[in-house]
Image (spheres, grey):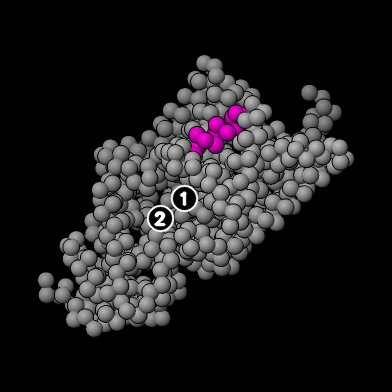
Amino acid sequence: MSERNLARLTSVRIQGFKRDLLWLAPAVLSTLCVFYFYLDSHPYPSFGSGLYMLISERIIEAGYALPETIPYYTDEGVPFAYPPLMFYVVAVIRDVTGLGPIAISRYLPGVVTVAYLVPTYLLARDLLASRPQAAVASLVVAVSPPVLRWHISAGGVVRAPAFLLAVTGIYAGLRLYRDRDSRWVVPSLVLFGLTVLTHPMYTVFFALSYFLLYLQFDRTRWGLTRGMVAGFGGILLAAPWWTQVMAIHGVDVFTGAAGTHGGIGGGVPALAEVTRIDFTSLEVVWQLLPVVGIVYLFRLGRYFLPVWLVAVTLALGKPRFSVFVGAFVVAVFLLEGVWEWLNLDEWSVSRRRLVTVALVGLATVGVAGGAMYASGAMNAHAGSPSQPQFIDREDVAAMNWVERNTASDATFVVQGDAAEWFPQQTRRTMLVGPWGVEWKGSDAYTRQLELYEAVSECNSAQCMSATLAEENVRPDYIYLPKGRFTVRGMEYQRTSQLAMSMHVSPEYQTVYENEGVIVFETMAGEGE
């Protein structure tokens, strides 16, 4: 290639890169705005990642060896069978930077949430063959509450990187099958292996989407062979983890966990959610447009996006995946279907103007809705605020007291969602709680979940004692929130009835209290 041709090719690439940055900018800027409102309204992270942070600490303590169990979450601890990649990443971050668990849980998910917009845009650009449509799709993904909920919150420490890896891997699959370019086999293999090592649900999303790309673009032996190399190669790449876990805990640790958290397969009820429109919510934009868009695409005989959306919904049943695919449907519908239906060619309206109007409108509605959702100002589930903080300043103070003033082998029952953070913050055993128990099987998980919910709903000392005695649970201390708190993300308003009942009961003695928390010692436990 001559110098002139090389210079021309370089110039074209630079110009294309600049155009991509321009089209990606609305999504990135919108997410940065939403992230700012989240941080401003959340001095502590929403939802929980206390178990994740404790896992990273155990990895450091073990010299970066794979731990067998994680202590303090129930009396026997829980098996460590989680895909370990992000726990090792967090361990390195903590080792190198000295950042604490709360800071990492606040900032890391948001940073990765911005990062995964890049492969989202590239996938939409190449799949839809349109930069404007890619801009719309990535913007919808950026501000949609169902996507934000589990990615920008504390659990996004694991889920947001898993999403980043999965979407990047799906893009690699598109380049492999559409372009028949074997150079994308190795990136696909590595990305699939890393996704396996990060989160099982996102692994299924990756594999299903990858398979559908094969069916759409390259139903040949060539494509099948390379897809199998990427899939089985990724599983083998993760083998040092899953073989060691099975050697320690057996195969049952995986099969048992598969039956918890709804398992794989959302089924018809999840698909029905796609068509159940809530016109009282700002989320109606992201609910209504994909449904109308599917009708438009079917009318044109363009089946890939509708099939992808239905398959993901049926297989996973999680709105964050359905909304992601739905964003591609929305982009096509807005910039093709609306143009056609309004017959804008006769109005002499330029397509650039329509794109600008669409982006401005979506960004305005999206940032407003996303900011309200991220800041916890929106009613998200059964009237409870979105993005609840599981702990606050009073919880941290109370947990610090527990760590300093109770025996290292003391046991606790914690009411409310602060329980998820309690073992990590105190290094004390929490006897009741479902976190991590899924690896013990569905029966153990269900028992812990039901007991945790029953304890958290108690509003008298008699209820607390009877509920624990029925399950033969005898803690040394009871940790109670005051005022508002959450149980599984659902908001409760605690009156003074429980505290007064515990105060006058001979079974309990107050040993610590601040504005938000009371800690009781169980007096009956002393004589046993």
Q: What type is the residue that disc 1 sits on? A: Val
Q: Magenta segment, which residues?
A: 302-313
Mark 2, Cα crowd under 10 Å, few <14 / some 14-19 / many 20+, is many
Which residue sits at x=60%, y=23%? 217
On residue 158, the disc is 1
Picture coordinates of residue 76, whole percent (x, y): 23, 56
Rounded to the nearest angstrom, the CA distance separating label 1 from label 2 is 8 Å
Viewer-nearest residue: 45 or 378 = 378
Q: Residue furthest bottom?
A: 504
Point out residue 326 in the picture as x, y percentages from the top left corner. Answer: 59, 41
User: Dividing the picture into quarters, in which one does residue 489 lie?
Assistant: bottom left
SS at mark 2 in the image = helix
Please identify the quarter of the rendering in which residue 395 is found.
Answer: bottom left
In contact (CB < 8 Å): disc 1 and disc 2: yes
Which residue sits at x=73%, y=45%?
Answer: 23
| Quadrant where the image shows the N terminus | top right
Is residue 45 visible from the viewing direction of this image?
Answer: no
Question: In terms of secondary structure, where does tag 1 sit?
Answer: helix
202 and 377: which one is in front? 377
Task: Residue 240: give x, y in percent of width and height.
Answer: 37, 37
Q: Is residue 350 visible?
A: yes
| Looking at the image, residue 255 lies above or below residue 158 | above
Q: Position of residue 445 (x, y in %)?
A: 29, 51
Extreme residue in the top direction: 221
The residue under the point 66% across, 48% down is 139
Q: Nearer the viewer, residue 14 or 122?
A: 122
Q: Which residue is mark 2?
A: 52
* Residue beneath the point at 50% across and 20% down: 224
Figure disc tally: 2
Q: Point out the tag, 1 or 2, that comes first from the N-terminus.
A: 2
